Image: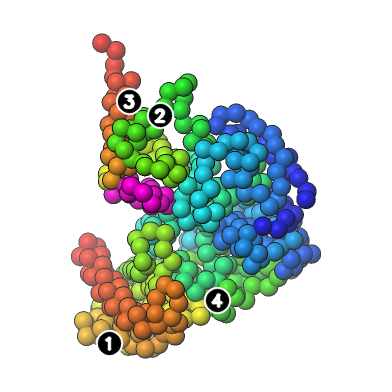
Amino acid sequence: MAETQIAFNINGNQEQIAAEPNQTLLQLLRDELGLTGTKDGCSSGDCGACVVLLDGKPVNSCMVLALQAEGSSVTTIEGLAKDGELHPVQRTFGEAWAFQCGFCTPGMLISCYALLESNDNPTREEILRAIAGNFCRCTGYQGVVKAVQQAAAELRATNSSEGAPDE
Amino acid sequence: MIAPKYTAPTSLADALQLKKESGAEARVIAGGTDLILRMRDRVLSPSLLIDLRALSLGNIVLGDDELCIGTSVSLSQVLENTDTQRLFPALVAACREFAGPPIRNRATLGGNIANASPAADLVPPLGAYDARVVLRSAGGERVLPLLEFFTGPGQSVIEPDEILTEIRLPLMPTLSAATFIKLGQRRSMAISQVNVTTRLSIHEENVVSEVRIVLGAVAPVPMRALAAEQIISGNALSDELLCSAAQKAAEEIMPISDVRASRSYRVEMTEVLVRRALFATRDELGRNATDG
């Protein structure tokens, strides 16, 4: 098997690694880079457990070839916390009981994070549309909606206090 | 998954040359959302993957009389583009209901066509808007109506040395409206049981000048319901006329029973969906006329 060196940015760090043509991005992340937060659920793009950000957009990493990530920037669940502090939506997932077994959670969080990056006041409908590719088979989606709305409120509060003129 | 060679050429000429040399052994990869799964399941075992990502085939360009969509344009791009929103709303509607966001961010228009699924959601709207596809080879290019591209489930007229590079949509007559309706077992992440797009274009005297009824998942290839269109063409849009056209469409289709729906259910639903789509299209025409 012919290995090819690829360079890409993973969670803010530039990485150079050998990849094989038959390897998916998911396999590269989990098996080579040890980033096992991203889950392998169905391996066929149906469940969303493997969702990561590729150049800022949620994608199913089981349906991207590792070689296709060359030159891209990838964010996994391991990259959401900053300086040891969880992103608000990671914390509100816990507070709102937005998961039970947790297997769908990494992919679900990536989709919710991507939504909040572009929309800090999403409606219930917008949240449900954003997570339409992420299946939860234990506890459902109501907790997720609550968690995202709670995180959105926190983000708006932070943004408005940051944007306010000094007093 | 087998271990093919992979390359991402930086010029279309290089890609076409590779396709010429390797023929059917080489597969073009864009989003990969169909191809990677079929490689994993060993349905396809190409020896070479030609990735289109380094080529300039990912743009939507509005010209004087047509909109050109590059083959690697993702469904998300179509959804977010103001020209497609304004000019081809039924296509945008089909993209909105397609799978879920992670797939829409990767899946491409060219892929949805080249895959040649009878249930492909983007084909009915593209067909109803009279889309043409551009097939390029090292020797030249040919342009053909989209609905002539398909020859059977997973089968098309594309030659081993050709690459589908572009989709061209003619701009519609001023008084036009189109409606996309998809029936699936869920609202998201569902393969269609039946999908339909209807388009009506009218003269100022409210007589239909162009009618398209394009159906998916009800025949070996996406199909126009020509006899149903014939009922409407040249006439005024009464309820009875639209109902009888919908009935005719259900007679024209050739559905199978499969894991998603039975043949008889598809026949029933075709009549219902075509009727709903035609009524919605007529109502939108009425609203546009009032707004204008």
Going by the numbered disc 2, the residue's amino acid type is His
x and y percentages locating residue B155 in the rendered image: 60, 75
Side of B117 where B245 appears, left or right = left
* Residue drawn at x 45%, y 44% as measured from the top left: A103
Image x and y of residue B255, in percent: 43, 82
Who is closer to the viewer here, B35 or B77? B35
Please indicate whether residue B123 sits to the left or right of residue B163 in the image: left
Q: Secondary structure at mark 4?
A: loop
Q: In the drawing, does residue B79 fall left or right of residue B112?
A: left
Which residue lies under the disc numbered 4?
Answer: B153
Report the Cα–Cα distance between label 4 and label 2: 46 Å
What amino acid is labelled 4 in the image? Answer: Pro
N-terminal of the pair, mark 1 or mark 4, is 4
Structural distance between the alpha carbons of marks 2 and 1: 57 Å
Give residue B244's mark: 1
Asked if badge 2 and badge 1 are on a common chain, one would say no
Q: CA distance from mark 2 to mark 3?
A: 14 Å
Name the residue tied to disc 3. A159
Per the model, the C-alpha gap separating discs 1 and 3 is 57 Å
Region of the chain picked out in magenta, as a range: A125-141
User: In this view of the protein, can residue B35 be seen by the observer?
Assistant: no
Residue assigned mark 2: A87
Separation of residues labelled 3 and 4 (CA atoms): 52 Å
Q: Report the amino acid beneath label 3.
A: Asn
